[in-house]
């Protein structure tokens, strides 16, 4: 404000009343005494006495040091500093109303647009507006608020950047409108400094105090091709960030995009202390050329980012029959029923070769054959070969080599059905021993107790052993109370014999005790681009005794279709990459584990595996060496510490060749607002308490004007000018002396 100016005449040595009386009386008496006896008219004496009195009074006043005092009165209004959070966390949608879901920036807009409150404050105080991230930038309300794009928040540096001790610019209070999410911890002594400044900080917290976590579909693994009658497995990886869900009511559903009908639904359960889980959904497509499906998360609680809760995909439906060649050594029970199933199933084109049959025996099948394939072109006519209890001498080394090469190239898949005589006992020295998913000895002990099949999680992932009974139940083949669904014979394969890349699909369950190492019934293994399944029993035919063809048919068709799906899709994996953090922070070590599931690649990899790491533009960042685990021969592990934020792609050099399979990590800067959606209202409350301020909710802003202290100041500046120092002042006594002298001369007194 402009200062008010007043000017007054004052006496520096002003005496008291008694001194005034004595001095003035003495001056009057002296002046009268000086002219009491002159012979002139009374008027002349009065004039001379008055002049003499004036001279003496003037001299007396000079002795009292008269001066002019000019006073400037200045009023300084106090200021209110309003700090508005301008960082990316303002874009988080965690403000829930009955009508809609809003961002924190929308809530900040409600605060700024409350013009009635701000106008009331403006009547008494000056309001200064700032947008801040790690520094404060002055803004005006005549313009739109800047977009919240700041990447880091530093509340401490922002507050300490203002001069709170400047008396010329008193600050009434800071009004801090933010979610409290600060990227950097406050410096030592921060709370003591804001306490000593004496300026209250009024916090208006934004966002939810308890920010909902974010559950997201991170990966969907599915075949690109399948058959119309297939039960197609869809494997979903789900990740969670933030507050762990309570586990009740969370589910994932598979639905048809065209009709919206729900195909399958499974609960979501995160293991203890894990932020990632896997769920398998199974669906049977409608008739048509393409299945358009969607996986969607269903959560009773609010989800932070809804856009990552859904993924759509398509699966091409194949109408081409699966070409299957079944080679069997003798007419055992499994052969009798399996060859009939292959003949009966319309989606399978089969041929059967029984090696023990007479030369005039008619080999059954959709495509009649009189001998085994002997050339590469003849073997390529088949998608799957089933080798039963067959002596290794039945196939020449050349034929065995062709089978192995076709499996490695992905042109052929293989099923082994173990037997009491020749498989696998006679195959140790054969090249196809590479395609048996366990290591010698091949003279396996027979288990003749009653055992039921117990599927593992790996079977769910590839969509097998989901065998439905007439009543809709799926436990008929696994129920140990049902004697007829148990097996009376299987080969005991010690788990320690299994090759590192082999996977157990089902194990034996005798209903009473479990061995320390589970005994497998079904084993899978990948060799090159092809897949192999080995069955240690040939007694699946027993399921026909209780239910006819229903259970038996489902089992074998699911097995065959699983091989056809893998062989026809790009989802087949030679290895699995697992990391401790899919979204790690800069300078945070990441544990990397690679499990090779392809036996051919494992043989050529050795003890070291190189992992190439590239940025989002394909530029090289690092090359990491992983070391083979001494206990798990197909597992390689190491740690890597990212130095910069951004997407990185990891590509293993498996088998000394760079693989086409990769994994992408999103490395975050821990100060990046976009990666830290949590609020920190407790810190805001602590800052306000230490500074003797207040916490005001958005809906309680009406009390804000009453909470602002009056820190305005009034200052008076005085300038003194002494008359003694003014030359013109002495003209007065000179003039009076001159007048008196002229009068005295005229009276001949001088």
Image: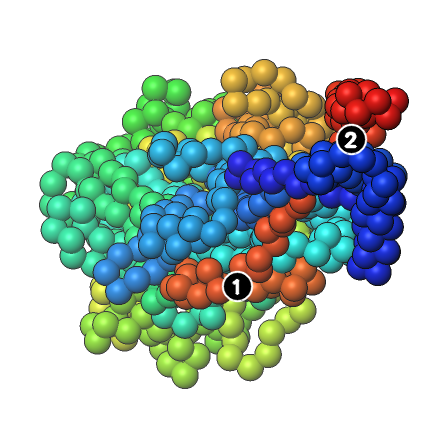
Residue on which the image places disc 1: 707
Residue on which the image places disc 2: 723
Give the residue displayed 40% in from the left and 77% down from the top. 479
**Quadrant in the picture for the C terminus:** top right
Query: Alpha carbon of mark 2 to alpha carbon of mark 1: how far?
Result: 51 Å
Q: Position of residue 172 (x, y in %)?
A: 59, 52
Structural crowding at the residue carrying mark 2, measured as other residues with C-alpha within 10 Å and reported as few (<14), some (14–19) or many (≥20): some
Q: Is residue 474 left or right of residue 16?
A: left
Using the image, determine if residue 301 lies above or below residue 612: below
Residue placed most toward the observer, 651 or 426: 651
Using the image, determine if residue 576 lies above or below residue 280: above
Residue 46 appears in the picture as rendered? yes
Structural crowding at the residue carrying mark 1, measured as other residues with C-alpha within 10 Å and reported as few (<14), some (14–19) or many (≥20): some
Give the residue displayed 52% in from the left and 33% down from the top. 138
Query: Which mark lies nearer to you, 2 or 1?
Result: 2
Dividing the picture into quarters, in which one does residue 326 lie? top left
Give the residue displayed 63% in from the left and 38% down from the top. 7
| First-in-chain label (2 vs 1) | 1
Q: Position of residue 609 (x, y in %)?
A: 69, 29
Residue placed most toward the observer, 540 or 649: 649
Residue placed most toward the observer, 595 or 311: 311
Q: Is residue 454 left or right of residue 468?
A: right
Q: Position of residue 213 (x, y in %)?
A: 47, 57
Q: Position of residue 244 (x, y in %)?
A: 52, 63
């Amino acid at each position: 404000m402009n200062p008010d100016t007043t000017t007054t005449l004052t006496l520096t040595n002003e005496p008291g009343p008694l001194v005034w009386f004595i001095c003035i009386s003495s001056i009057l008496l002296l002046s009268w005494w000086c002219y009491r006896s002159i012979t002139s008219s009374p008027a002349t004496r009065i004039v001379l006495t008055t002049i003499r009195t004036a001279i003496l009074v003037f001299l007396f006043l000079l002795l009292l040091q008269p001066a002019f005092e000019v006073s400037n009165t200045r009023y300084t209004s106090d200021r209110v500093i309003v700090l508005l959070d301008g960082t990316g966390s303002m874009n988080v949608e965690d403000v829930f109303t009955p009508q809609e879901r809003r961002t924190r920036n929308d809530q900040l807009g409600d605060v700024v647009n409350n013009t009635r409150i701000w106008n009331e404050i403006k009547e008494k105080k000056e309001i200064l507006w700032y947008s801040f991230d790690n520094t404060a930038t002055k803004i005006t309300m005549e313009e739109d608020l800047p977009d919240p794009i700041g990447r880091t928040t530093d509340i401490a540096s922002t507050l300490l950047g203002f001069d709170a001790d400047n008396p010329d610019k008193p600050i009434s209070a800071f009004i801090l409108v933010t979610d409290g999410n600060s990227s950097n911890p406050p410096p030592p002594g921060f709370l003591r400094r804001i306490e000593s400044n004496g300026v209250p900080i009024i916090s208006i917290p934004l966002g939810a105090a308890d920010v909902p976590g974010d559950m997201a579909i991170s990966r969907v693994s599915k075949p690109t091709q399948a058959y119309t009658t297939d039960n197609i497995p869809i494997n979903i990886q789900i990740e969670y960030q933030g507050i762990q869900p309570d586990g009740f009511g969370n589910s994932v559903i598979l639905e048809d995009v065209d009709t919206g009908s729900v195909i399958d639904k499974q609960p979501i359960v995160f293991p203890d202390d894990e932020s990632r889980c896997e769920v398998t959904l199974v669906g049977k497509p409608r008739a048509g050329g393409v299945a358009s499906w969607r996986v969607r998360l269903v959560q009773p609680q609010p989800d932070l980012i809804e856009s990552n809760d859904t993924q759509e995909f398509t699966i091409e439906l194949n109408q081409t029959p699966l070409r299957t060649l079944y080679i069997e050594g003798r007419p055992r029970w499994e052969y009798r029923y399996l060859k009939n199933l292959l003949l009966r199933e319309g989606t399978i084109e089969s041929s059967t070769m029984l090696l023990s049959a007479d030369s005039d025996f008619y080999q059954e099948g959709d495509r009649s054959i009189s001998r085994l394939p002997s050339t590469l072109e003849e073997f390529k006519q088949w998608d799957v070969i089933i080798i039963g209890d067959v002596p290794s001498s039945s196939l020449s080394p050349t034929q065995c080599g062709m089978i192995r090469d076709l499996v490695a190239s992905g042109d052929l898949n293989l099923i082994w059905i173990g037997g009491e005589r020749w498989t696998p006992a006679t195959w140790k020295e054969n090249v196809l021993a590479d395609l048996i998913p366990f290591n010698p000895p091949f003279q396996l002990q027979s288990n003749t107790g009653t055992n039921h099949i117990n599927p593992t999680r790996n079977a769910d992932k590839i969509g097998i052993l989901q065998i439905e009974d007439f009543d809709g139940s799926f436990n008929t083949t696994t129920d140990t109370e049902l004697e007829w669904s148990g097996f009376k014979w299987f080969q005991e394969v010690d788990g320690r014999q299994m090759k590192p890349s082999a996977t157990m699909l089902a194990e034996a369950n005798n209903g009473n005790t479990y061995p320390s190492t589970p005994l497998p019934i079904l084993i899978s293994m990948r060799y090159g681009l092809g897949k192999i399944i080995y069955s240690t029993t040939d007694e699946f035919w027993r399921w026909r005794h209780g239910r006819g063809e229903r259970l038996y048919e489902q089992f074998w068709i699911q097995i065959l279709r699983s091989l056809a799906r893998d062989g026809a899709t790009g989802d087949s994996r030679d290895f699995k990459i697992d990391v401790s953090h899919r979204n790690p922070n800069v300078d945070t070590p990441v544990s990397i584990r690679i499990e090779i599931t392809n036996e051919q690649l494992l043989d050529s990899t050795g003890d070291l595996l190189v992992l190439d790491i590239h940025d989002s533009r394909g530029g090289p960042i690092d090359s990491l060496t992983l070391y083979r685990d001494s206990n798990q021969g197909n597992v390689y592990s190491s740690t890597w510490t990212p130095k910069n934020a951004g997407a990185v792609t990891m590509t293993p050099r498996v088998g000394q060749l760079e693989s086409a399979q990769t994994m992408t990590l999103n490395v975050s800067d821990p100060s990046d607002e976009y990666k830290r959606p949590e609020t920190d209202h407790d810190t805001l409350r602590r800052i306000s308490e230490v500074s003797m301020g207040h916490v005001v909710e958005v809906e309680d802003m009406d009390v804000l004007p009453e909470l602002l202290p009056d820190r305005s100041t009034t200052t008076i500046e005085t300038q003194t000018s002494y008359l003694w120092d003014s030359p013109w002042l002495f003209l007065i006594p000179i003039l009076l002396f001159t007048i008196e002298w002229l009068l005295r001369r005229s009276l001949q007194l001088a």
